[in-house]
Amino acid sequence: MNKRNICVVITARPSYSRIKTALLAIKEHPELNLQLVVAASALLERYGSVVKYIEEDGLEITRKIYTVLEGENLISMAKTTGIGISELASVFDDLKPDIVVTIADRYETISTAIAASYMNIPLAHIQGGEVTGNIDEKVRHAITKLADLHLVTTSMAKDRVIKMGENPENVFVTGCPSIDLAKEIYLDPELNFDPIFKYGGVGANIQVKPNNYLVVMQHPVTTSHERAQEEINATLEAVLELNYPTMLFWPNVDAGSDGTSKAIRVFREKNLSNKVHFFKNMSGTDFLRVLNNSLCLIGNSSVGIRECSYLGVPVVNLGNRQNRRDRGQNVIDVGYHSEEIIKAVEEQIAHGKYEKSSIYGNGNAAENIANVLATAVLSIEKVLMY
Amino acid sequence: MNKRNICVVITARPSYSRIKTALLAIKEHPELNLQLVVAASALLERYGSVVKYIEEDGLEITRKIYTVLEGENLISMAKTTGIGISELASVFDDLKPDIVVTIADRYETISTAIAASYMNIPLAHIQGGEVTGNIDEKVRHAITKLADLHLVTTSMAKDRVIKMGENPENVFVTGCPSIDLAKEIYLDPELNFDPIFKYGGVGANIQVKPNNYLVVMQHPVTTSHERAQEEINATLEAVLELNYPTMLFWPNVDAGSDGTSKAIRVFREKNLSNKVHFFKNMSGTDFLRVLNNSLCLIGNSSVGIRECSYLGVPVVNLGNRQNRRDRGQNVIDVGYHSEEIIKAVEEQIAHGKYEKSSIYGNGNAAENIANVLATAVLSIEKVLMY
Amino acid sequence: MNKRNICVVITARPSYSRIKTALLAIKEHPELNLQLVVAASALLERYGSVVKYIEEDGLEITRKIYTVLEGENLISMAKTTGIGISELASVFDDLKPDIVVTIADRYETISTAIAASYMNIPLAHIQGGEVTGNIDEKVRHAITKLADLHLVTTSMAKDRVIKMGENPENVFVTGCPSIDLAKEIYLDPELNFDPIFKYGGVGANIQVKPNNYLVVMQHPVTTSHERAQEEINATLEAVLELNYPTMLFWPNVDAGSDGTSKAIRVFREKNLSNKVHFFKNMSGTDFLRVLNNSLCLIGNSSVGIRECSYLGVPVVNLGNRQNRRDRGQNVIDVGYHSEEIIKAVEEQIAHGKYEKSSIYGNGNAAENIANVLATAVLSIEKVLMY
Amino acid sequence: MNKRNICVVITARPSYSRIKTALLAIKEHPELNLQLVVAASALLERYGSVVKYIEEDGLEITRKIYTVLEGENLISMAKTTGIGISELASVFDDLKPDIVVTIADRYETISTAIAASYMNIPLAHIQGGEVTGNIDEKVRHAITKLADLHLVTTSMAKDRVIKMGENPENVFVTGCPSIDLAKEIYLDPELNFDPIFKYGGVGANIQVKPNNYLVVMQHPVTTSHERAQEEINATLEAVLELNYPTMLFWPNVDAGSDGTSKAIRVFREKNLSNKVHFFKNMSGTDFLRVLNNSLCLIGNSSVGIRECSYLGVPVVNLGNRQNRRDRGQNVIDVGYHSEEIIKAVEEQIAHGKYEKSSIYGNGNAAENIANVLATAVLSIEKVLMY
């Protein structure tokens, strides 16, 4: 029997963390052959290349493709997307996958969707049907309309994909593979390493212990990149005022990351705080373990909505980046204002850990995804259902 | 008062014909400034460059961009799309439009949609919400999810766009601008020129008179491009058998056009018929006039569904290219089989002209489109409505 | 022992014909492994794709890459070159050749040279050191300055390459592989097939017999592409007047090919002559056989200078395209004027066949080239010798 | 009278510094119109964008184009070059320059040369005919073969360009415009600003006074980028040992800059020295002033060979990057070994300032360049002179 070739395209560090368990499940599945393409910022040192994590996880990279046009502005984002299509078309032509898998909604993931659908290769989209706001919103739903198979994380997401006119037969609730990792941490929750010793980074040499520190991870919001500096500064002020040991993570590549990164760099170089340590990146598991033992996560990352709901980590979610995402009890939403942030963090610290929520799945998403990819009826013909 | 800069991107001859009246209305509108970008096959001689028609129509081309990677296969289509994004990003960066307009659903139009939306420029999509099948289907609805304003041709289309989760406030039924042209012909229907004298072309020197000839316009269907030759051959056989004077038009550029074009070339070079004349292209108005005075149109072009419904021209529509498009009484659908085609054409000739239908508008779409572009509230933020 | 991977990039039909014997010799060489990349117009049907010839010759294509941006003007030539570099960089990264081979001086061959030299792969250049004029001149010598090994056809070429500052140790006179093919024809000269029967084509159904026909092959000259139509028309007038059976070959892709092609198409469609047959392409061997049995070759192709010198075929060479190329006795040079052409052709017919010249080698270039590639000391470091 | 449009393409910070006076002279020349295109790393913050310096110098940027594909390896260098050609072709098509000017020999400057020459625009090359080694060597001479006008800095360079087969009528010794800036400093030599106060940077807060400090500027060498870390470490060790206040400048973008930059970053983060301050960039004039008042320059930058020869600054030149460049008395050449470096620096400090050399001109290059561009006979046709 011929195995199905499943080509998964990873374009950024957080996408890899989120999909890792599914990649391993695809690799192990007797009827599937994994083709792993690493592209865009996932290859670049300064955004925290995932190459070494992938290799440490026992996965083999089939192709590396460079697609990021430097500039970190809107024009370079658009051109990066164009380059991505062109490069991926060559890769798909060589690898002849039976299914191409694209993940979530970063701007460059539409390159994968277009290259696959234009080359008549069935396209599976993971994490469609969610609602957030900003450019991701447009990208995510556009990919839904290009995709042939929809592997969604929640039943609400399934409903939305079907409402958009997709055939219910092609929509599968698998849960979110990020929860598979969270489940591992849930079952073995201890903070069993010293983050600064293991990952280096720069800034204050803080002493990280369970329940004595905050975590900050804030990404620039694409359609308002001039405000990026201002927005991160609100957070940094709150962190200074709160005065807990704090682990701060640099943002991903995006238009505006320059703004956010620059403000962080300025903050760091002023040496204003002796309680903040700055990390470039961390393996997905270690990061979850860090979150699980923290007092609170501050930021606008989706990890606060997804993994933290399962782990019950208190989250102060900033601004509208995760606006409409389905969420559990563990989240307090605030604006980019230092006082609001301070107040919410204090409230969360007072509350402590929340109950486990299974809104994003029960930790078996990887297996579900591999099974759908192995058994789904493949077709590239589709038509609006109304 | 500052005029709004409206940047319309034309990527193919038929798109130009269809949008022409709207371009003129934008140009004349006191609050709008037209920026006309001509790209892709619309620039290329061998697909019937529209440059000279645009100039004859009194419009000025703001930018010409070359984006078609030769190959006429799936990989070159994908790469052409990537190149288009990259080139259009530069153009939009220079022209600083207030609105970018993309038309319909050809594969390369998604380049316009991505470049505009990624650069935070409000995107207006003309002719969304229709249903057809094949790759166009995916492209059209993906563009809907990237677009901020939807200018649709029918009330059914409006309903579908809203169902897909778009804000009803941003969906406008303007009618189809192609009907504006059809209206001119409706009001002045005479065949007032000799097509061979005016447009040259090759093949038999047929005598074209009102109601003595057939018109053939058949495009390859992207996702089955190997069958392209077979499919056009069914039509050519039918044409031979029917033995009417016949005006045959070459297809657009597309993966597979080589198959279709080659079969036509072979047919022509065999000199099998002394009743078929081959045209490369024709101005939109002249083409409608030719259709309006024909016995029947054979093919799979959307002109048979739209303009011909208004003009009441009998149409034999082939295959599933126009599958789910809203249609009037004037269409008989058949497969790519010569006997079916012959039978349907004979039926249509026996029936003669149909009543005018206004399913695609009443001939004032151009004005409606210009007004929406001048007055719509502009925003690039949107979110799924459910 | 590890074989050296020799990656040869073919970008056009005539380059393939010229290099064919060397490719076979590389393939057969015990210490070499041939990696054959087919790119640019060599893949495109409308310029006479070489794919089927390559396969018929028993060679395997390692990679096909599409690089031609349609437009046939200067801007699309430049962009095609840029695309070529980008695509070839990926290919070289995959194939990891020990030597990359680029041939002659067409505009797109500099893509091969840049991609290889920028990726630190030793670059061998075949046919450097010649002198012609026009853009080819710039391209050829620029490639010489990027190349590490120079495999030249004549001792005069070797002198020029060394004068340009290259290390004499890296310059090898191999002869021209095109002469290897010519030698085969020289040894077996009969016209043993009917060209129209074998290759089709269009136009008059002429009767081709040894020494009863003319051959025309005229390429547009890049830096004067507006004059292309005028220049081919001079030839067509001469052909009409001379009134011999004539085999006319379409030109290669180039900026301006549209002008030349269009003029030929107009000429053909006017049906002015009942003695001209039009061919798209022909295998290299068959073409040489056709030349060898012709009365005279008219045009500006290098085949008239090279292969015809060895075969002694009379040539009327037009314009300055072959301006400074080293040449034998068999060539009469004229301008693009019909009277001049007529006079020279009549003179050549009166003279008949010339003596064999070995200015471009003795027919063992293929073997010489393979040997150099197998044994040359490889280095990417070089420095001007003065 | 129509002014000639002179389009100068700047692709990196050092190129701008070197050409600045010529740009101002072109701008002021009554018969010239300056079109300034800023591209590649010259636009990027992390390599020290030149945008603000250009604006401060009173020049206007006509176009900005993003061309750097991230990756900092050989494949991304090649692709960056391809992208550059494609983008510049569009720019030249828009700007319609009479002459395009490309500077020196960085890998991406060949994009300018190819785009211009392929679009039939006369190409002027500044700083051809020099000899160095590594990939620059290939690039520089390849550009010479594409260029129509050669504006060289020394009479030796002129001789080499002519030897390569260029027409002596098109080769002009203008001197090096970098010397024009050096002349300004020569006439007004005082260190009239505090570098740390003015430019920030990171590291030790050293006290910079005339003749109390060293300057380090070391670029990775492209064809040995794995050794980049090792090579910079030799320098850093020497600097530690020498124990003078030291101003260290980050390298340019290049394959391997990651290696060099990383080693510097590691060195800095270890806080090994309290005498080294790290600068990202500086205006050309300020940098020369800093050099002019330093004890010695250590590194492999061409500034040590050119400007420092005029200013008489002692230089310890590392490795073979400037290998064959014509040089004055002020340079001691050593390998990348800390002991050699230490010994040479001590020798230079003992010697102190050298006499002014005019090998690279007398400080009127800008004027000479503008005059050549205004008066040279323009042609794109050229042919090897032998």
Image (spheres, coloured by chain):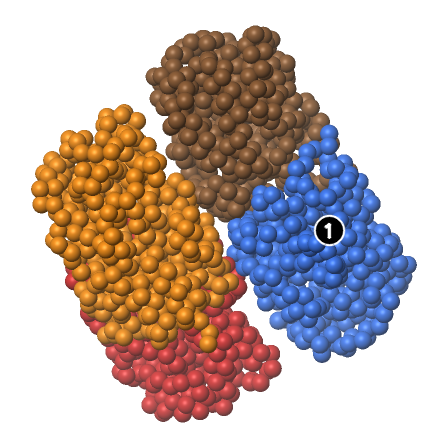
Chain colours: A red, B orange, C brown, D blue
Instruction: Using the image as rendered, state which of residue D235 and residue C114 is in the foreground.
Output: C114
Q: Residue at 42% across / 49% down in the picture? A: B51
Does residue A41 show up? no
* Residue D339 to residue A258: above or below: above
Amino acid on which the number 1 mark rests in the picture: Leu
Q: How many marks?
A: 1
Residue D266 % position (x, y): 61, 67
* Circle 1 Cα neighbour tier, 10 Å, few/some/many (<14 / 14–19 / ≥20): many
Q: As drawn, is B225 to the left or to the right of C149?
A: left
Q: Quadrant of the N terminus of chain D?
A: bottom right
* Residue D227 to residue D55: above or below: above
Task: Residue D68: name its quadrant.
Answer: bottom right
Q: Secondary structure at mark 1?
A: helix
Residue D249 % position (x, y): 69, 65
Q: As drawn, is A214 to the left or to the right of B317?
A: right
Q: Residue at 54% across / 37% down in the picture? A: C225
Instruction: Using the image as rendered, state which of residue C374 and residue B303 is in the foreground.
Output: B303
* Residue A313 to residue C298: above or below: below
Q: Residue at 44% across / 91% down in the picture? A: A339
Residue D14 % position (x, y): 69, 60
Chain for mark 1?
D
Q: Residue at 22% across / 54% down in the picture? A: B186
Q: Which residue is mark 1?
A: D373
Does residue C299 show up? yes
Residue C351 % position (x, y): 58, 7
